Protein backbone atom coordinates (compact mmCIF):
# COMPACT_ATOMS: atom_id res chain seq x y z
CA UNK A 1 0.00 0.00 0.00
CA UNK A 2 1.58 3.36 -0.98
CA UNK A 3 2.75 5.61 1.83
CA UNK A 4 0.99 8.66 0.48
CA UNK A 5 -2.47 7.17 0.29
CA UNK A 6 -5.36 9.15 1.75
CA UNK A 7 -7.91 7.79 4.16
CA UNK A 8 -11.28 9.46 4.33
CA UNK A 9 -13.80 8.79 7.03
CA UNK A 10 -17.38 9.85 7.26
CA UNK A 11 -17.65 13.23 8.95
CA UNK A 12 -19.82 13.64 12.02
CA UNK A 13 -22.19 16.57 12.35
CA UNK A 14 -21.95 17.96 15.86
CA UNK A 15 -24.30 20.85 16.41
CA UNK A 16 -26.59 22.36 19.00
CA UNK A 17 -26.29 22.61 22.76
CA UNK A 18 -25.36 18.99 23.29
CA UNK A 19 -25.30 15.53 21.79
CA UNK A 20 -27.72 12.79 22.75
CA UNK A 21 -27.64 9.15 21.69
CA UNK A 22 -30.36 6.71 22.50
CA UNK A 23 -30.53 3.03 23.07
CA UNK A 24 -27.53 0.89 23.87
CA UNK A 25 -29.03 -2.60 23.82
CA UNK A 26 -29.12 -4.58 27.04
CA UNK A 27 -26.26 -7.01 27.52
CA UNK A 28 -26.17 -10.31 29.44
CA UNK A 29 -24.50 -8.64 32.43
CA UNK A 30 -27.40 -6.23 32.82
CA UNK A 31 -29.97 -9.02 32.48
CA UNK A 32 -28.24 -11.13 35.08
CA UNK A 33 -28.09 -8.31 37.58
CA UNK A 34 -31.79 -7.57 37.14
CA UNK A 35 -33.15 -11.11 37.07
CA UNK A 36 -33.64 -13.20 40.21
CA UNK A 37 -32.77 -10.25 42.44
CA UNK A 38 -35.81 -8.34 41.18
CA UNK A 39 -38.13 -10.53 43.31
CA UNK A 40 -36.27 -9.71 46.53
CA UNK A 41 -35.19 -6.16 46.00
CA UNK A 42 -34.70 -3.32 43.54
CA UNK A 43 -33.57 -3.90 40.00
CA UNK A 44 -29.88 -3.17 39.57
CA UNK A 45 -27.60 -2.12 36.74
CA UNK A 46 -23.80 -2.00 36.44
CA UNK A 47 -22.17 0.57 34.16
CA UNK A 48 -18.46 0.99 33.42
CA UNK A 49 -17.13 4.31 32.19
CA UNK A 50 -13.62 4.08 30.72
CA UNK A 51 -11.37 7.06 30.26
CA UNK A 52 -8.04 8.26 28.87
CA UNK A 53 -6.45 11.69 28.93
CA UNK A 54 -3.50 13.66 27.61
CA UNK A 55 -2.84 11.27 24.74
CA UNK A 56 -0.76 13.97 23.04
CA UNK A 57 -0.64 12.21 19.70
CA UNK A 58 0.61 8.84 20.92
CA UNK A 59 -0.86 6.13 18.73
CA UNK A 60 1.92 3.56 19.09
CA UNK A 61 4.42 2.59 21.75
CA UNK A 62 7.07 4.48 19.82
CA UNK A 63 9.55 7.22 20.69
CA UNK A 64 9.99 9.30 17.53
CA UNK A 65 12.83 11.24 19.16
CA UNK A 66 14.86 8.08 19.74
CA UNK A 67 13.57 6.21 16.68
CA UNK A 68 12.84 3.18 18.83
CA UNK A 69 10.18 1.47 20.92
CA UNK A 70 9.26 3.57 23.91
CA UNK A 71 10.69 2.49 27.25
CA UNK A 72 11.27 4.01 30.65
CA UNK A 73 12.58 2.92 34.04
CA UNK A 74 9.09 1.90 35.15
CA UNK A 75 8.63 -0.27 32.04
CA UNK A 76 5.59 1.71 30.95
CA UNK A 77 4.05 1.29 27.53
CA UNK A 78 1.88 3.83 25.79
CA UNK A 79 -0.35 4.61 22.85
CA UNK A 80 -3.87 4.17 21.55
CA UNK A 81 -3.02 0.80 20.03
CA UNK A 82 -2.49 -0.54 23.56
CA UNK A 83 -5.53 1.33 24.89
CA UNK A 84 -7.61 -0.32 22.17
CA UNK A 85 -6.63 -3.74 23.46
CA UNK A 86 -7.52 -2.77 27.04
CA UNK A 87 -10.85 -1.34 25.92
CA UNK A 88 -11.66 -4.55 24.04
CA UNK A 89 -10.93 -6.55 27.19
CA UNK A 90 -13.18 -4.39 29.34
CA UNK A 91 -16.00 -4.51 26.81
CA UNK A 92 -15.76 -8.29 26.72
CA UNK A 93 -15.80 -8.51 30.53
CA UNK A 94 -18.59 -6.01 31.16
CA UNK A 95 -20.61 -6.31 27.98
CA UNK A 96 -19.98 -3.78 25.24
CA UNK A 97 -23.38 -2.16 25.75
CA UNK A 98 -22.68 -1.55 29.44
CA UNK A 99 -19.65 0.64 28.79
CA UNK A 100 -18.85 4.20 27.84
CA UNK A 101 -15.45 5.45 26.59
CA UNK A 102 -14.31 9.04 27.20
CA UNK A 103 -11.20 11.19 26.92
CA UNK A 104 -10.28 14.30 28.92
CA UNK A 105 -8.35 16.21 26.26
CA UNK A 106 -4.95 17.16 24.84
CA UNK A 107 -5.17 14.89 21.84
CA UNK A 108 -3.74 16.55 18.70
CA UNK A 109 -0.40 17.96 19.90
CA UNK A 110 2.70 16.40 21.38
CA UNK A 111 4.50 14.13 18.91
CA UNK A 112 6.07 14.49 15.47
CA UNK A 113 3.07 12.49 14.26
CA UNK A 114 0.63 15.23 15.26
CA UNK A 115 2.97 17.99 14.11
CA UNK A 116 3.32 16.39 10.70
CA UNK A 117 -0.44 16.26 10.10
CA UNK A 118 -0.92 19.80 11.39
CA UNK A 119 1.95 21.48 9.53
CA UNK A 120 3.77 19.29 6.99
CA UNK A 121 0.82 17.44 5.44
CA UNK A 122 -1.98 19.36 7.15
CA UNK A 123 -5.47 18.00 7.58
CA UNK A 124 -6.78 21.45 6.64
CA UNK A 125 -5.43 21.28 3.09
CA UNK A 126 -7.90 20.65 0.27
CA UNK A 127 -8.15 16.90 -0.08
CA UNK A 128 -5.91 16.56 2.98
CA UNK A 129 -5.60 13.48 5.18
CA UNK A 130 -7.78 12.41 8.08
CA UNK A 131 -5.95 13.04 11.32
CA UNK A 132 -4.36 9.85 12.71
CA UNK A 133 -5.82 10.52 16.15
CA UNK A 134 -9.31 10.83 14.67
CA UNK A 135 -8.81 7.58 12.75
CA UNK A 136 -7.61 5.71 15.83
CA UNK A 137 -10.23 7.07 18.23
CA UNK A 138 -13.03 6.45 15.72
CA UNK A 139 -11.86 2.88 15.25
CA UNK A 140 -11.68 2.27 19.00
CA UNK A 141 -15.15 3.73 19.45
CA UNK A 142 -14.81 6.73 21.72
CA UNK A 143 -18.16 8.17 22.81
CA UNK A 144 -16.95 11.70 23.64
CA UNK A 145 -13.84 13.71 24.45
CA UNK A 146 -13.31 16.95 26.35
CA UNK A 147 -11.27 19.69 24.73
CA UNK A 148 -7.76 20.13 26.10
CA UNK A 149 -5.78 23.36 26.00
CA UNK A 150 -3.35 21.87 23.47
CA UNK A 151 -6.23 21.31 21.06
CA UNK A 152 -5.91 25.02 20.27
CA UNK A 153 -2.15 25.05 19.59
CA UNK A 154 -2.54 24.86 15.82
CA UNK A 155 -5.40 27.31 15.59
CA UNK A 156 -9.18 27.04 15.44
CA UNK A 157 -9.24 25.95 11.78
CA UNK A 158 -7.19 22.83 12.52
CA UNK A 159 -9.27 22.07 15.59
CA UNK A 160 -12.54 22.43 13.68
CA UNK A 161 -11.24 20.16 10.93
CA UNK A 162 -10.24 17.57 13.50
CA UNK A 163 -13.67 17.89 15.10
CA UNK A 164 -15.35 17.25 11.73
CA UNK A 165 -13.29 14.08 11.28
CA UNK A 166 -14.24 12.62 14.66
CA UNK A 167 -17.25 10.33 14.97
CA UNK A 168 -17.79 11.56 18.53
CA UNK A 169 -18.31 15.04 19.99
CA UNK A 170 -15.58 17.28 21.39
CA UNK A 171 -17.09 18.75 24.55
CA UNK A 172 -16.38 22.13 26.10
CA UNK A 173 -19.12 23.67 28.24
CA UNK A 174 -16.80 26.54 29.17
CA UNK A 175 -15.54 27.25 25.64
CA UNK A 176 -17.85 30.08 24.60
CA UNK A 177 -18.29 32.20 21.52
CA UNK A 178 -16.80 35.58 22.45
CA UNK A 179 -19.62 37.52 20.77
CA UNK A 180 -22.68 35.58 21.87
CA UNK A 181 -21.33 33.93 25.03
CA UNK A 182 -23.02 30.75 23.89
CA UNK A 183 -21.20 27.39 23.80
CA UNK A 184 -18.92 27.14 20.79
CA UNK A 185 -18.70 23.35 21.22
CA UNK A 186 -21.24 20.85 22.56
CA UNK A 187 -21.29 21.22 26.36
CA UNK A 188 -22.54 17.72 27.05
CA UNK A 189 -23.27 14.25 25.67
CA UNK A 190 -26.10 11.96 26.77
CA UNK A 191 -26.41 8.23 26.22
CA UNK A 192 -29.20 5.88 27.29
CA UNK A 193 -28.52 2.30 28.36
CA UNK A 194 -31.44 -0.13 28.03
CA UNK A 195 -32.29 -2.35 30.99
CA UNK A 196 -34.88 -5.15 30.60
CA UNK A 197 -37.97 -4.53 32.70
CA UNK A 198 -36.95 -1.02 33.74
CA UNK A 199 -36.54 2.44 32.24
CA UNK A 200 -33.20 3.09 30.51
CA UNK A 201 -30.29 4.45 32.50
CA UNK A 202 -29.58 7.95 31.26
CA UNK A 203 -25.91 8.97 31.50
CA UNK A 204 -24.81 12.56 30.92
CA UNK A 205 -21.20 13.56 30.29
CA UNK A 206 -20.26 17.20 30.81
CA UNK A 207 -17.06 18.37 29.14
CA UNK A 208 -14.93 21.12 30.70
CA UNK A 209 -11.69 22.55 29.38
CA UNK A 210 -8.96 24.75 30.79
CA UNK A 211 -9.48 28.52 31.14
CA UNK A 212 -5.74 29.00 30.64
CA UNK A 213 -6.36 28.65 26.89
CA UNK A 214 -7.29 32.34 26.94
CA UNK A 215 -3.68 33.07 27.93
CA UNK A 216 -1.62 30.31 26.38
CA UNK A 217 -3.21 30.50 22.94
CA UNK A 218 -4.31 34.11 23.02
CA UNK A 219 -3.08 34.66 19.47
CA UNK A 220 -5.64 32.18 18.18
CA UNK A 221 -8.62 32.68 20.49
CA UNK A 222 -8.64 36.35 21.52
CA UNK A 223 -11.84 38.01 20.35
CA UNK A 224 -13.21 34.67 19.14
CA UNK A 225 -13.58 32.45 22.19
CA UNK A 226 -13.74 32.95 25.95
CA UNK A 227 -13.09 30.37 28.65
CA UNK A 228 -14.85 30.93 31.99
CA UNK A 229 -14.06 28.79 35.02
CA UNK A 230 -14.84 25.11 35.36
CA UNK A 231 -16.63 25.45 38.66
CA UNK A 232 -18.82 28.27 37.38
CA UNK A 233 -19.89 26.42 34.27
CA UNK A 234 -20.37 23.09 36.04
CA UNK A 235 -22.71 24.85 38.47
CA UNK A 236 -24.72 26.05 35.46
CA UNK A 237 -24.86 22.80 33.50
CA UNK A 238 -25.08 19.98 36.07
CA UNK A 239 -28.54 21.07 37.32
CA UNK A 240 -29.70 21.28 33.70
CA UNK A 241 -28.52 17.75 33.04
CA UNK A 242 -30.29 16.50 36.16
CA UNK A 243 -33.47 18.31 35.11
CA UNK A 244 -33.22 16.56 31.75
CA UNK A 245 -33.45 13.25 33.59
CA UNK A 246 -29.80 12.26 33.88
CA UNK A 247 -29.43 9.35 36.28
CA UNK A 248 -25.64 9.54 36.21
CA UNK A 249 -23.53 12.66 35.68
CA UNK A 250 -19.89 12.20 34.72
CA UNK A 251 -17.59 15.16 34.12
CA UNK A 252 -14.65 14.90 31.73
CA UNK A 253 -12.43 17.76 32.85
CA UNK A 254 -9.15 18.89 31.35
CA UNK A 255 -8.06 20.20 34.71
CA UNK A 256 -5.98 18.79 37.56
CA UNK A 257 -6.99 18.46 41.20
CA UNK A 258 -4.44 20.66 43.00
CA UNK A 259 -6.43 23.89 43.04
CA UNK A 260 -3.41 25.80 41.70
CA UNK A 261 -2.70 27.86 38.59
CA UNK A 262 0.45 28.52 36.59
CA UNK A 263 -0.75 31.80 35.13
CA UNK A 264 -0.69 33.91 38.30
CA UNK A 265 -3.37 36.59 38.53
CA UNK A 266 -3.88 36.92 34.78
CA UNK A 267 -7.28 35.21 35.04
CA UNK A 268 -9.77 34.96 37.92
CA UNK A 269 -10.19 31.23 37.30
CA UNK A 270 -8.33 28.22 38.66
CA UNK A 271 -6.32 26.06 36.27
CA UNK A 272 -6.46 22.79 38.24
CA UNK A 273 -10.03 22.92 39.52
CA UNK A 274 -11.38 19.35 39.23
CA UNK A 275 -11.41 18.70 42.98
CA UNK A 276 -13.05 22.09 43.58
CA UNK A 277 -15.77 21.17 41.10
CA UNK A 278 -16.37 17.90 42.94
CA UNK A 279 -16.45 19.63 46.31
CA UNK A 280 -18.64 22.60 45.46
CA UNK A 281 -21.00 21.57 42.64
CA UNK A 282 -23.73 19.13 43.71
CA UNK A 283 -25.04 16.42 41.43
CA UNK A 284 -21.80 14.93 40.02
CA UNK A 285 -21.04 11.23 40.42
CA UNK A 286 -17.56 10.94 38.88
CA UNK A 287 -14.89 13.12 37.26
CA UNK A 288 -12.36 11.96 34.69
CA UNK A 289 -9.39 14.23 35.39
CA UNK A 290 -6.78 15.46 32.90
CA UNK A 291 -4.12 18.09 32.25
CA UNK A 292 -1.74 17.45 35.16
CA UNK A 293 -0.02 14.33 33.78
CA UNK A 294 -0.18 12.52 37.12
CA UNK A 295 -1.64 9.14 38.01
CA UNK A 296 -4.63 9.14 40.36
CA UNK A 297 -6.22 5.67 40.60
CA UNK A 298 -9.04 6.90 42.82
CA UNK A 299 -9.67 10.12 44.73
CA UNK A 300 -12.81 10.54 46.82
CA UNK A 301 -14.08 14.07 47.47
CA UNK A 302 -17.06 14.89 49.65
CA UNK A 303 -19.47 17.41 48.17
CA UNK A 304 -19.96 20.15 50.74
CA UNK A 305 -23.62 20.68 49.80
CA UNK A 306 -24.90 17.09 49.70
CA UNK A 307 -22.36 15.12 51.71
CA UNK A 308 -22.20 12.64 48.85
CA UNK A 309 -18.91 11.20 47.64
CA UNK A 310 -17.64 12.17 44.21
CA UNK A 311 -15.03 9.82 42.76
CA UNK A 312 -12.19 11.23 40.63
CA UNK A 313 -9.54 9.40 38.63
CA UNK A 314 -6.73 10.49 36.32
CA UNK A 315 -5.08 7.87 34.13
CA UNK A 316 -1.42 8.43 33.33
CA UNK A 317 -0.83 10.44 30.17
CA UNK A 318 0.11 9.25 26.65
CA UNK A 319 -2.20 6.25 26.84
CA UNK A 320 -0.15 4.54 29.55
CA UNK A 321 -3.24 3.88 31.68
CA UNK A 322 -6.99 3.44 31.24
CA UNK A 323 -9.33 4.57 34.01
CA UNK A 324 -12.39 2.48 34.88
CA UNK A 325 -15.30 3.92 36.83
CA UNK A 326 -17.51 1.02 37.91
CA UNK A 327 -20.91 2.49 38.74
CA UNK A 328 -23.64 0.48 40.47
CA UNK A 329 -27.24 1.67 40.23
CA UNK A 330 -30.52 0.52 41.76
CA UNK A 331 -34.05 1.31 40.54
CA UNK A 332 -36.00 2.55 43.56
CA UNK A 333 -39.06 4.75 44.00
CA UNK A 334 -39.50 5.09 40.27
CA UNK A 335 -35.99 6.17 39.36
CA UNK A 336 -32.40 4.99 39.07
CA UNK A 337 -30.14 5.82 42.00
CA UNK A 338 -26.34 5.60 42.02
CA UNK A 339 -25.43 3.27 44.87
CA UNK A 340 -21.67 3.25 44.48
CA UNK A 341 -18.80 4.41 42.27
CA UNK A 342 -15.36 2.81 42.34
CA UNK A 343 -12.38 3.82 40.21
CA UNK A 344 -9.39 1.77 39.14
CA UNK A 345 -6.71 1.75 36.46
CA UNK A 346 -5.65 -0.71 33.77
CA UNK A 347 -2.01 -0.64 32.66
CA UNK A 348 -1.03 -0.50 28.98
CA UNK A 349 2.16 -2.47 29.70
CA UNK A 350 0.07 -5.61 30.31
CA UNK A 351 -1.15 -5.92 26.72
CA UNK A 352 0.03 -5.83 23.12
CA UNK A 353 -0.99 -3.40 20.38
CA UNK A 354 -4.37 -4.01 18.80
CA UNK A 355 -3.57 -5.27 15.25
CA UNK A 356 -6.57 -3.32 13.95
CA UNK A 357 -4.95 0.00 14.94
CA UNK A 358 -1.57 -1.14 13.64
CA UNK A 359 -3.03 -1.94 10.24
CA UNK A 360 -5.00 1.31 10.18
CA UNK A 361 -2.09 3.68 10.84
CA UNK A 362 1.12 1.90 9.90
CA UNK A 363 1.45 3.99 6.73
CA UNK A 364 1.13 7.31 8.53
CA UNK A 365 3.59 6.15 11.17
CA UNK A 366 6.13 5.15 8.50
CA UNK A 367 5.82 8.53 6.77
CA UNK A 368 6.57 10.38 9.99
CA UNK A 369 9.49 8.10 10.91
CA UNK A 370 11.02 8.90 7.52
CA UNK A 371 10.38 12.61 8.01
CA UNK A 372 12.04 12.88 11.43
CA UNK A 373 15.10 10.95 10.27
CA UNK A 374 15.98 13.52 7.59
CA UNK A 375 19.57 14.74 8.01
CA UNK A 376 19.86 18.54 8.22
CA UNK A 377 23.51 18.97 9.24
CA UNK A 378 26.53 17.65 11.13
CA UNK A 379 27.53 18.22 14.76
CA UNK A 380 31.17 18.59 15.74
CA UNK A 381 30.46 17.60 19.36
CA UNK A 382 27.88 15.62 21.28
CA UNK A 383 25.40 17.94 22.99
CA UNK A 384 23.18 16.78 25.82
CA UNK A 385 20.61 18.06 28.32
CA UNK A 386 21.54 15.57 31.04
CA UNK A 387 22.99 18.27 33.32
CA UNK A 388 21.23 21.26 31.77
CA UNK A 389 18.92 21.96 34.68
CA UNK A 390 21.78 22.78 37.07
CA UNK A 391 24.71 23.59 34.74
CA UNK A 392 24.86 26.08 31.87
CA UNK A 393 24.69 23.69 28.90
CA UNK A 394 25.64 24.57 25.30
CA UNK A 395 22.63 22.66 23.98
CA UNK A 396 20.28 25.20 25.61
CA UNK A 397 22.46 28.03 24.32
CA UNK A 398 21.63 26.74 20.84
CA UNK A 399 17.97 27.56 21.48
CA UNK A 400 18.68 31.05 22.79
CA UNK A 401 21.09 31.79 19.92
CA UNK A 402 18.48 30.83 17.32
CA UNK A 403 15.86 32.95 19.06
CA UNK A 404 18.21 35.94 19.27
CA UNK A 405 19.04 35.69 15.57
CA UNK A 406 15.41 35.38 14.48
CA UNK A 407 14.27 38.36 16.56
CA UNK A 408 17.22 40.54 15.49
CA UNK A 409 16.37 39.87 11.85
CA UNK A 410 12.69 40.57 12.46
CA UNK A 411 13.40 43.93 14.15
CA UNK A 412 15.99 45.09 11.62
CA UNK A 413 15.03 48.48 10.25
CA UNK A 414 12.56 49.20 13.09
CA UNK A 415 12.88 51.69 15.94
CA UNK A 416 13.90 48.80 18.19
CA UNK A 417 16.75 47.52 16.03
CA UNK A 418 19.43 49.11 18.22
CA UNK A 419 18.24 47.51 21.45
CA UNK A 420 20.15 44.48 22.78
CA UNK A 421 18.33 41.19 22.24
CA UNK A 422 18.45 38.57 24.97
CA UNK A 423 16.58 35.26 25.01
CA UNK A 424 15.04 32.73 27.37
CA UNK A 425 14.96 28.96 27.06
CA UNK A 426 14.14 26.07 29.37
CA UNK A 427 15.65 22.58 29.80
CA UNK A 428 12.54 20.77 28.64
CA UNK A 429 14.06 17.29 28.55
CA UNK A 430 16.59 15.55 30.78
CA UNK A 431 17.49 13.00 28.12
CA UNK A 432 17.79 14.92 24.86
CA UNK A 433 21.03 14.41 22.94
CA UNK A 434 22.40 15.65 19.65
CA UNK A 435 25.20 13.19 18.88
CA UNK A 436 28.38 14.13 17.09
CA UNK A 437 27.95 13.40 13.39
CA UNK A 438 24.74 13.57 11.40
CA UNK A 439 21.99 15.75 12.87
CA UNK A 440 18.38 14.84 12.07
CA UNK A 441 15.05 16.56 12.57
CA UNK A 442 14.27 14.13 15.37
CA UNK A 443 17.47 15.12 17.20
CA UNK A 444 16.39 18.76 17.13
CA UNK A 445 12.77 17.93 17.90
CA UNK A 446 13.81 16.07 21.04
CA UNK A 447 15.52 19.26 22.21
CA UNK A 448 12.39 21.37 21.76
CA UNK A 449 9.42 19.11 22.40
CA UNK A 450 6.70 21.79 22.44
CA UNK A 451 5.08 23.58 19.51
CA UNK A 452 5.88 27.00 20.96
CA UNK A 453 6.33 30.06 18.77
CA UNK A 454 8.49 33.14 19.23
CA UNK A 455 7.56 36.54 20.66
CA UNK A 456 9.66 39.70 21.21
CA UNK A 457 8.89 41.66 24.39
CA UNK A 458 10.25 45.01 25.56
CA UNK A 459 11.67 44.69 29.09
CA UNK A 460 13.77 46.81 31.44
CA UNK A 461 16.85 45.72 33.36
CA UNK A 462 14.87 45.82 36.61
CA UNK A 463 12.19 43.58 35.14
CA UNK A 464 14.78 41.12 33.86
CA UNK A 465 16.35 41.02 37.33
CA UNK A 466 12.96 40.16 38.86
CA UNK A 467 12.39 37.58 36.11
CA UNK A 468 15.67 35.85 36.96
CA UNK A 469 14.93 35.89 40.71
CA UNK A 470 11.62 34.22 40.05
CA UNK A 471 13.26 31.63 37.81
CA UNK A 472 15.87 30.89 40.50
CA UNK A 473 13.12 29.77 42.88
CA UNK A 474 13.39 26.49 40.95
CA UNK A 475 16.41 25.49 43.06
CA UNK A 476 16.18 24.00 46.56
CA UNK A 477 17.95 26.15 49.15
CA UNK A 478 21.19 24.37 49.98
CA UNK A 479 23.53 25.60 52.70
CA UNK A 480 27.21 26.19 52.00
CA UNK A 481 29.13 23.06 52.91
CA UNK A 482 26.10 20.77 52.72
CA UNK A 483 26.26 17.77 50.43
CA UNK A 484 24.81 18.42 46.97
CA UNK A 485 22.52 15.77 45.51
CA UNK A 486 21.66 16.85 41.97
CA UNK A 487 18.51 14.71 42.07
CA UNK A 488 17.21 16.84 44.95
CA UNK A 489 18.64 20.19 43.91
CA UNK A 490 15.87 21.31 41.56
CA UNK A 491 12.08 21.39 41.26
CA UNK A 492 11.57 23.27 44.54
CA UNK A 493 7.89 23.38 45.53
CA UNK A 494 7.08 21.10 42.60
CA UNK A 495 8.17 23.55 39.90
CA UNK A 496 8.67 21.61 36.64
CA UNK A 497 11.81 21.89 34.53
CA UNK A 498 9.95 23.79 31.81
CA UNK A 499 9.36 26.61 34.29
CA UNK A 500 13.06 27.22 34.86
CA UNK A 501 14.63 29.67 32.37
CA UNK A 502 18.08 30.43 31.14
CA UNK A 503 18.47 34.04 29.95
CA UNK A 504 21.23 34.60 27.38
CA UNK A 505 23.29 37.73 26.84
CA UNK A 506 23.77 38.41 30.55
CA UNK A 507 26.17 37.09 33.18
CA UNK A 508 24.90 36.12 36.61
CA UNK A 509 25.32 33.77 39.55
CA UNK A 510 22.50 31.93 41.31
CA UNK A 511 23.39 31.63 45.02
CA UNK A 512 21.37 28.67 46.22
CA UNK A 513 22.51 29.15 49.81
CA UNK A 514 20.27 32.21 49.90
CA UNK A 515 16.52 32.29 50.33
CA UNK A 516 14.35 32.53 47.23
CA UNK A 517 14.10 36.13 46.09
CA UNK A 518 17.70 36.97 47.00
CA UNK A 519 19.69 34.62 44.82
CA UNK A 520 20.75 36.56 41.71
CA UNK A 521 24.28 37.89 42.24
CA UNK A 522 26.86 39.63 40.04
CA UNK A 523 24.33 40.39 37.32
CA UNK A 524 26.08 42.12 34.44
CA UNK A 525 25.54 43.08 30.84
CA UNK A 526 28.47 43.75 28.48
CA UNK A 527 30.89 43.53 31.39
CA UNK A 528 29.17 46.16 33.56
CA UNK A 529 26.55 45.89 36.33
CA UNK A 530 23.07 45.68 34.85
CA UNK A 531 21.40 49.08 34.51
CA UNK A 532 17.86 48.67 35.83
CA UNK A 533 16.62 51.40 33.49
CA UNK A 534 18.14 49.97 30.32
CA UNK A 535 15.75 48.52 27.77
CA UNK A 536 16.12 45.04 26.31
CA UNK A 537 14.25 42.94 23.79
CA UNK A 538 13.47 39.55 25.30
CA UNK A 539 13.04 36.75 22.77
CA UNK A 540 10.57 34.48 24.55
CA UNK A 541 8.28 31.59 23.68
CA UNK A 542 4.55 32.28 23.43
CA UNK A 543 3.76 30.16 26.48
CA UNK A 544 5.97 32.30 28.67
CA UNK A 545 4.96 35.52 26.91
CA UNK A 546 1.34 34.79 27.73
CA UNK A 547 2.10 34.23 31.43
CA UNK A 548 2.72 30.49 31.34
CA UNK A 549 4.58 29.79 34.56
CA UNK A 550 3.51 33.17 36.02
CA UNK A 551 6.91 34.80 35.44
CA UNK A 552 6.74 38.49 36.43
CA UNK A 553 6.32 41.39 33.99
CA UNK A 554 6.63 39.46 30.75
CA UNK A 555 2.91 39.01 30.06
CA UNK A 556 2.19 42.72 30.50
CA UNK A 557 5.32 43.89 28.66
CA UNK A 558 4.93 45.58 25.29
CA UNK A 559 4.92 43.10 22.42
CA UNK A 560 7.19 44.19 19.57
CA UNK A 561 6.80 41.21 17.24
CA UNK A 562 5.52 37.64 17.09
CA UNK A 563 5.20 34.85 14.53
CA UNK A 564 3.41 31.55 13.99
CA UNK A 565 6.44 29.48 12.93
CA UNK A 566 7.44 27.01 15.66
CA UNK A 567 10.73 27.56 17.47
CA UNK A 568 11.56 23.95 16.68
CA UNK A 569 11.29 24.76 12.98
CA UNK A 570 13.50 27.82 13.43
CA UNK A 571 16.16 25.66 15.06
CA UNK A 572 16.05 23.20 12.14
CA UNK A 573 16.32 26.09 9.65
CA UNK A 574 19.29 27.57 11.53
CA UNK A 575 21.15 24.25 11.60
CA UNK A 576 20.33 23.57 7.95
CA UNK A 577 21.68 26.98 6.92
CA UNK A 578 24.87 26.49 8.93
CA UNK A 579 25.42 22.92 7.76
CA UNK A 580 27.75 22.36 10.71
CA UNK A 581 26.61 22.51 14.33
CA UNK A 582 29.67 23.78 16.18
CA UNK A 583 29.40 24.99 19.84
CA UNK A 584 31.75 27.90 19.08
CA UNK A 585 28.90 29.41 17.05
CA UNK A 586 26.39 29.47 19.91
CA UNK A 587 27.76 28.33 23.28
CA UNK A 588 28.25 30.96 25.98
CA UNK A 589 28.96 30.96 29.72
CA UNK A 590 25.99 32.92 31.06
CA UNK A 591 25.30 31.65 34.57
CA UNK A 592 26.46 29.31 37.31
CA UNK A 593 25.24 28.04 40.67
CA UNK A 594 27.12 29.29 43.74
CA UNK A 595 26.88 29.14 47.50
CA UNK A 596 28.06 32.27 49.27
CA UNK A 597 30.08 33.12 46.18
CA UNK A 598 31.72 29.71 45.75
CA UNK A 599 30.74 27.76 42.62
CA UNK A 600 28.76 24.59 43.34
CA UNK A 601 30.33 22.76 40.39
Image (cartoon, rainbow, N blue to C red):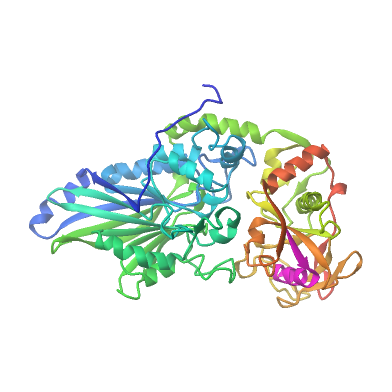
Q: Measured along the vertical axis of the image, is residue 133 above or below residue 207?
A: above
Is 469 colored magenta in this rendering? yes
Q: Which residues are magenta?
A: 456-472
Residue at image position (17%, 61%) is 335
Residue at image position (67%, 34%) is 373
- Majority secondary structure of the magenta segment? helix
Residue at image position (67%, 62%) is 487
Of residue 244 and residue 377, the one placed in the foreground of this image is: 244
Of residue 417 and residue 452, the one placed in the foreground of this image is: 417
- Which residue is at the far top? 1
Residue 34 percent location from the top left of the image: 15, 52
Residue 517 percent location from the top left of the image: 72, 76
Q: Measured along the vertical axis of the image, is residue 593 above or below residue 576?
A: below
Q: Taking the image as drawn, is residue 418 in sight? A: yes
Q: Taking the image as drawn, is residue 63 in sight? A: no
Q: Quadrant of the rendered structure where residue 477 is?
A: bottom right
Q: Is residue 547 left or right of residue 400?
A: left
Residue at image position (84%, 60%) is 420
Amino acid sequence: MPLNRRKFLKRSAVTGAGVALAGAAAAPAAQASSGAQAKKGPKRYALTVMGTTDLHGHVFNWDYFKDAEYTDSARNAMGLARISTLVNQVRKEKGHCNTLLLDAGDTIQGTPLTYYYAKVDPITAKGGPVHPMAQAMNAIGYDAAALGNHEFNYGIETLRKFESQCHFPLLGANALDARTQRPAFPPYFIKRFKVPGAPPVKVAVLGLTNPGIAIWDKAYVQGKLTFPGLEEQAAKWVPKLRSMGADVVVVSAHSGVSGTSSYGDQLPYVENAAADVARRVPGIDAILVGHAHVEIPELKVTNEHTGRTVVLSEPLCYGERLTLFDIELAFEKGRWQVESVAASLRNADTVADDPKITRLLSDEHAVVVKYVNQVVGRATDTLTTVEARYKDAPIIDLITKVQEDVVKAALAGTEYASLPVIAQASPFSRTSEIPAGEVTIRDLSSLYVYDNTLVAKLMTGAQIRAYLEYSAEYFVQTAAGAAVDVEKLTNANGRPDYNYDYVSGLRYDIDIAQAAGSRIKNLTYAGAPLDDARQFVLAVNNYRANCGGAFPYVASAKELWSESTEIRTRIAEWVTAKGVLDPKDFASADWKLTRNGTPVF
